[in-house]
Amino acid sequence: MSGRSEQARIYRISENRVWRGKTELSPAQIHALAQTLAAITRTREEDALRKVYPVGARVRFGGNLHTVTGYTDSPGLPPMLKLSSNTIAHPTHVTHT
């Protein structure tokens, strides 16, 4: 946690306009909000991936057994699994063994 007190913010969205309270957000504020939401989404996706496929888990990919060795962290791309044999795989392309 950043040390800041958590504060709920409520936004209203209609078509291509966004308001917080009675104030309409500027394009720059909307862009900043979108970046924040994207970062939150990525963190949650990464947490879910780590929960389902912890490091050391055995998975089958392309007919071969692999061990999960880590996770990718490439901005703009979905989180993926790093597997043994220097293989990277999307979670939907592997199965648990």
Image (cartoon, rainbow, N blue to C red):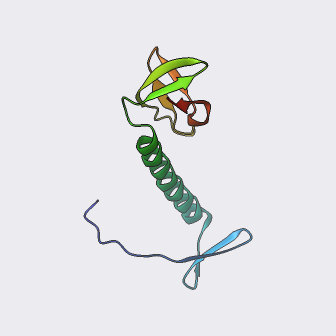
Tell me: 47 left or right of 18: left
Q: Residue furthest right?
A: 15
Residue 25 location (% of width, % of height): 59, 72
- Quarter containing the N terminus: bottom left
For residue 64, above or below residue 71: above
For residue 24, above or below residue 83: below
Q: How many marks?
A: 0
Q: In the image shown, does 55 or 71 lie closer to the viewer?
A: 55
Q: Residue furthest top?
A: 85
Residue positioned 37% across, 32% down in the render: 55
Residue 88 location (% of width, % of height): 52, 24
Q: Residue furthest bottom?
A: 22
Residue 81 location (% of width, % of height): 49, 31
For residue 41, above or below residue 72: below
| Quadrant assignment, res 20 | bottom right
Tell me: 92 left or right of 45: right
Q: Residue furthest front?
A: 97
For residue 61, above or below residue 46: above
Residue positioned 54% across, 83% down in the render: 21
Residue positioned 42% across, 41% down in the render: 50
